[in-house]
Amino acid sequence: MSSNMAQAIKQLVQDKGVSEELILKTIESSLLAAYKKKYGTTENAVVKFNEDGTEVTIFAQKRIVEEVEDPVTEIALDEALKLSNESEIGDELLIEINPKDFDRVAIQSAKQKAKQTLKEIQKDTLYSEFKDKIGEMIIGYYQRERNGNIYVDLGKTEGILPKKYQSPREIYRPNDRIKALIYEINKNPSGLQIVLTRTHSEFVRKIFELEVPEIYDKTVEVFKIVREPGYRTKIAVYSNRDDVDPVGACVGLKGVRIQAVVRELEGEKIDILKYDPDPRIFVKNALSPAEVSQVIILDDVKKQVLAVVPDNQFALAIGKQGLNVRLANRLVDWNIDVKTETQFGEMDITDKVKEAVSALFTDVEEEIVKISELPGITPAMVEALKRNGIEDIEKLVAFSKDELAKLEGISEKNASAIMKIIQENVEIVEEQVGEEEEEQVKTGESTEAEEEKAESIDEKEDTGQDEVVEEETYACPECGATVTPGMKVCPNCGVGLSFEIEEDIEDENKKNS
């Protein structure tokens, strides 16, 4: 073979990224293909490389016979002796085949085999290299465009940026530098297809990791990213350290970091907000840049929430074509209904609010009374307490740690564990009851009638009378005005009054009685 083979191999290694060993195997398979095309078999074909792999030779292994029946696998003794003086019948001899002896069809078959083998090897090599890079960022250059799809030169291979994974804001030209995310890798008959994307949320996350060191080292975590490519992105972040502001870290000093991200996204709007486990606060943050007056949870199960905003903030909260609130819905995973303060004032949400409050109370666990229902209590502890006649929590809380340790079957360690369970799960409320109140509770004598009686006694004590008596009235004989026995003159006409007759009759009645 030509001594230039070594240079050709090095060139293939450099251009295709294929190992030298695989290239040598490709050369071997192509020679065997040419041999088979000429002689119809490869069973007696032997390919050998020299030590440094710069030359290759193909041999035909033939058996020495007296009379040749198959010239492909056999050789006559007289012919063998010309090649080797030590030849004997039955021996096998390696006879070198000159590749120039191959006809045009055999050479074409060898080339086709070599090309196909190299392609398969390159495909497998690239697949092994890129399969672990799915989800990683890669940089390439605009090569060509077809049917809206952009083909990107990645060096060793070519990637495709489908039209559906391109931002509507972006326009590409030949040789433009393109930063994209490896989305998926597919094997097909034509080769390896590396699909790229610039529209997925994960692409934005990777850009933030490059621009914000706190996200890269996990000091600041990204909770969730939602995006309408080319228009708006919302990213919720939180910090693992109290002294680090997650939003401030992403924005950077004077907005340097966020501006770098916006430039990479060709001017796409980005809202960075703080994640909060409280859905009310999270919803309020998610509707930024709009200001939210209050957030009311209408249905916790169906995840329906009402956000009230000032009248002048409604359009900002909804966003153009509902984009802002739509992204907020996806970010918090709640169904957000946005209303202005005026609309909220006109709404009748009393029933809904009542249902929400009722739901809160119905979710509260019922009070437990049995020791066996206490979280963390072991069956052995329950049984030991039961043997000592203690089954209710109310009775158990009356014991101190030392008193529990003295009970049969209760060790000091168990007593400590029981006291800890009580402290963590039982709320003890002490009530102070007066002696009179306590007596009333015991006898059951505190009734409404007694309360009325007590009020009546209090009134009599205040007036100094045992009984309220209605005073008698009379008519003035002159003008008919109402007068009482204590009056000397009529207050209306001024005539003199005398009640002596009535008083005499009253005295007489007293004597007779």
Image (cartoon, rainbow, N blue to C red):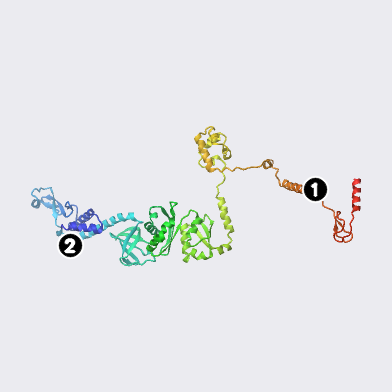
Image quadrant in which you'd find residue 121: bottom left
Q: What element carries label 1?
A: loop
Q: Depth check: 65 or 187 in front?
A: 187
**Label of residue 467 in the image:** 1
Residue 275 placement (x, y as % from top left): 46, 55
Query: Given the image, on which type of amino acid does mark 1 rest?
Result: Glu
- Asked if the residue at tag 1 contacts the one at tag 2, i.e. Cβ–Cβ closer than 8 Å, the answer is no
Residue 235 placement (x, y as % from top left): 43, 58
Evaluate whether residue 374 shows in this view. no
**Label of residue 104 in the image:** 2
Q: Which of marks 2 and 1 is in front?
A: 1
Q: Is residue 230 left or right of residue 308?
A: left
Residue 80 placement (x, y as % from top left): 10, 51
* First in residue order: circle 2 vs circle 1: 2
Residue 5 placement (x, y as % from top left): 18, 57
**How crowded is the residue under tag 2: few (<14 C-alpha within 10 Å), some, or many (20+)?**
few
Q: Residue at x 51, y 37 (%)?
A: 416
